[in-house]
Amino acid sequence: MKMDVMNVRRLIPTAVLAGAVALGTTALTSCSGAEAVGGKDGKLGVTASFYPLQFVAEQIGKEHVKVDGLTKPGVEPHDLEITPKQTAQLGEADVVLYLKNLQPAVDKAVAQSGVKSIVDAATLTELEAHGDSGHDHGSEQPHAEGEAHAEGEAHAEGGHDDSHGESGTDPHVWLDPVKYAEIAKGVGAALEKADPDHAADYKKNTDELVGKLTALDTEFKDGLKNTASRTFITTHSAFGYLAERYGLDQEGISGVDPESEPSPARMKELQAVAKKDNVTTVFFETLASDKTAKTLAADTGLKTDVLDPIEGITDTSQGADYFEVMRSNLKNLQKALGAK
Ligand SMILES: [Zn+2]
């Protein structure tokens, strides 16, 4: 008899678990592992395509949201491929945040997700093409061959940077704190709409985040006001918005696709630019290979340092979140440009 009771007791949790899983499966389709039971814990489920949008959702949603990022830390977001599990996860979200034309696989999955609240961050601010200073930018890819300037050669070979090509605009908008604040406002409004019960909190958190971004903008403005050089060289032309905001000139080594190899002509040109504009440093990013940056630096006797496009945060990032890495970027830029 005692044995039976124990057996029954041992059976209960299993049965409950099985029931919960079955319910979860019906109501929410598939969910990963332990998360299946309990789902989103009654929170607003937000799926963000990559780190900058994930960060905004976390900062504004705080305890009211459960944020999933589609791009795991350390994965180069431009090349992201979506697993069937992630596609299913995307379909379960209450709100999806993404940036159209950055990640083709995400664009496709989002279009098929059937989620009611889908926010394209590109619609929350104004994206630009950055054809002038970031002339080897991948966004120019479709017109590269036809263009007169020699820099066109630098982006002719890239195979998979069409991700930027379709819209002709530069996606790296989060690296401008002013534009990132516009995105924050739009995300805040979307969360308010999707979860009206917590609208007051979302509004307060949005204001707080926008305030922090405004302060960051002031730090950049002040910190880069007075420098010996205005030109910086970087492996990944992700800093067009930042350069424009603070009156700097970005020279990309190999375009938006950090894996593509620059042409010998581009390398020669960059050496000339480095000499003319008193460039001291070649910047590389943390996620992608730094081979070309090191080659160029060695050939020209320049230093190398990190300028992080903040497409993901890893153990090797120079900071734990967007604000910390941006401040580290500022410090490295000040050093390289000879800030007074
Ligand atoms: Zn990028």
Image (cartoon, grey):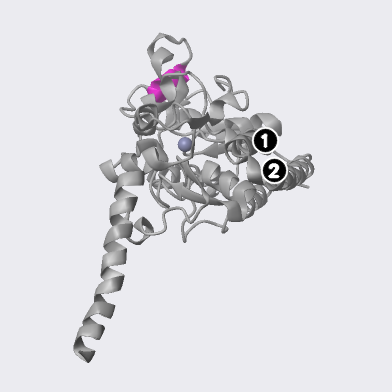
On screen, residue 56 versus residue 290, left or right, reads right
Which x, y percent locates residue 109? Answer: 35, 32
On screen, residue 336 versus residue 84, left or right, reads right
When the figure is inspected, residue 314 is found, relative to residue 5, above or below; the finding is above
Asked if the residue at tag 1 contacts the one at tag 2, i.e. Cβ–Cβ closer than 8 Å, the answer is yes
Q: Residue at x 61, y 27 (%)?
A: 124
Q: Nearer the viewer, residue 57 or 1?
A: 1
Q: Amino acid at mark 1?
A: Lys
Query: Badge 2: how crowded within 10 Å, few (<14), some, or many (20+)?
Result: many
Which x, y percent locates residue 92? Answer: 39, 42
Considering the numbered disc 2 on the image, is that residue within a helix, a strand or a loop? helix
Q: Which residues are magenta?
A: 150-155
* Residue most extreme to the front: 1
On screen, residue 244 versus residue 207, left or right, reads left
Q: Amino acid at mark 2?
A: Thr
Q: Residue at x 79, y 43 (%)?
A: 222
Query: Disc 1 designates what residue?
Result: 185
Which x, y percent locates residue 59? Answer: 62, 50
Query: Disc 2 designates what residue?
Result: 206
Considering the numbered disc 1 on the image, is that residue within a helix, a strand or a loop? helix
Q: Residue at x 68, y 42 (%)?
A: 199
When the figure is inspected, residue 314 is found, relative to residue 276, above or below; the finding is below
Q: CA distance from mark 2 to mark 1?
A: 6 Å
State yes or no: residue 152 in magenta. Answer: yes
